Image (cartoon, rainbow, N blue to C red):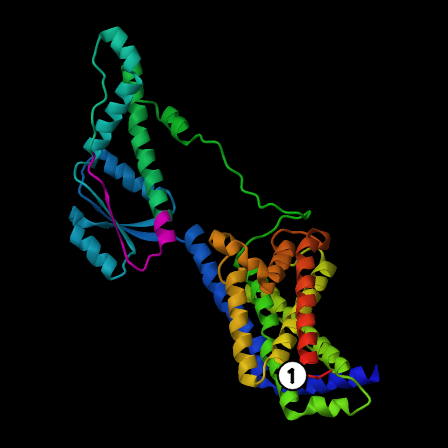
Amino acid sequence: MAKLWASIKKDWRILIRDRVGLALMFIMPIVLAIVIASVQNSTFELVNNKKIPLLIANKDTGAASKELEAALEKGGMFVIKKIPAGDDALVKTGIEKKEALVGLVIPNNYTHEVMLKAENVSEQALQGVLATSTGIDTSAKENTATPLTLYYHPVLQNSFRQGIDEALSSVLQIVQSKYIVRQLYSGINDDATIPVNLEQQILTNQTPVRQLPVSKGSTAVVLNATQHNIPAWTVFAMFFIVISLGSSIVREKTSGSFLRLKTMPTSLAVSFVAKQITYVLITILQAIVIFGIGKWLFPKMGLPALNFPEDKLGLLFVILICGWCAASFAMCIGILSKTQEQSNGVGAISIVLFAAIGGLLVPSFAMPESFQSIMKFSPLHWCLEAFYGLFLEGGRLKDVYFRVIPILGIIVVFQMIAWVSMRRQRLI
């Protein structure tokens, strides 16, 4: 035990002198967590809360175009900025100057075509009644409507454009439905004026939709950018101990420290166990620091606070297992590398690749099917899934054990590779 404690103290002193390694292990993931959580939170607010400026050039003077403008403004997604005289050029100029990222041009015959379509639809709906009672020909009339023109700035991403298209389509459908309902009411009751309360009841009395995240715990899970990013960048930080631990192992190999240890009444196994214990403790410290920032610093920065899972012991166990996996990987890279450059380069690149295919950089559900099986070879994927099972799904340790078992299997693989490599290099 004394030999193990002495090795731990030695590795700790080496670690605190490695300022670059400490920066990569603590400062880099903290900055990434703050920046990316801020960006994603702003994106969520833009989609859900903030209104998008919309330039409207209305060439139509009828009632339908006025109702369209009112419906767009009432929908809550857009801030309407009207262009006088319905000038397309002013719309393009405004978008080029980024006064708004989206512009809509309403054609001059919009109201006429809306009413024409309403008449056509109502006549087809009443075809049986009118044909038998009056003998009127109610065959379908071809309707070739002039399309509305939607201008957008090229910087607007496809996901935002799709959301804007869906919102615009919904508003257009509401306006068209109003006129169809009025025409049907007029055709049935021989009265052109439909009661306002009846029109509102037909158009707005929809079945409500209640959205609830699926949670395995007793309390509801709060989903936000912080809940997604803090666990992800904690895992990323854990595995970046490869820069410090890998370099430490390479230095000791090239400096002859391992040879000197073989001449002493101790074993290299004690040294490697001490290194793993030291860096597993570092990963626990990383998790405490990053989780603490998400819990207490983020609210002061205007970001959502991190909500800890119910199972605190389960969270500690997952942190410990993920830290051990990161230490095993770093030790494996250090033993296989011949120089510090190899260790740092291979270690950093492999972590970024594991993060890319493991779901840290791009959500796993958004990946193509060809990557769905490849991502299972990434240790970061299983570590992230274990954290998500606690933070996002509200589960306990018993609910994520099937994600912890692959992590244990990966640890065994890394330990075996390291042991075989040490045997081949005659370090043991």
Q: Secondary structure at mark 1?
A: helix
x, y percent for residue 58: 20, 44
Residue 212 found in image quarter? top right
Indicate the amino acid at tag 1: Ile
Front-most of residues 104 and 60? 104
Residue under label 1, please give it. Answer: 249
Front-most of residues 22 and 288? 22
Outermost residue to the front: 424
Which residue is drawn at the image coordinates 22% and 18% (left, top)? Answer: 139
Outermost residue to the right: 1
Front-most of residues 191 and 346? 346
Which residue is drawn at the image coordinates 61% and 71% (left, top)? Answer: 238
Front-most of residues 124 and 353? 353
Residue 239 found in image quarter? bottom right
Q: Is residue 283 visible?
A: no
x, y percent for residue 47: 42, 52
Rendered-image quadrant of the N terminus? bottom right
x, y percent for residue 313: 74, 60
Residue 113 found in image quarter? top left
- Quick check: is 157 in the magenta stretch? yes
Q: Residues within 10 Å of mark 1 (few under 14, many from 20)?
A: many
- Quick check: is 358 in the magenta stretch? no
Q: Is residue 202 left or right of residue 311?
A: left
Rendered-image quadrant of the C terminus? bottom right
Q: Is residue 145 left or right of residue 359?
A: left
Which residue is drawn at the image coordinates 64% and 75% (left, top)? Answer: 332
Q: Is residue 313 visible?
A: yes
Residue numbers of the magenta segment: 145-162
295 over 4 or under it: above or below: above
x, y percent for residue 242: 60, 76
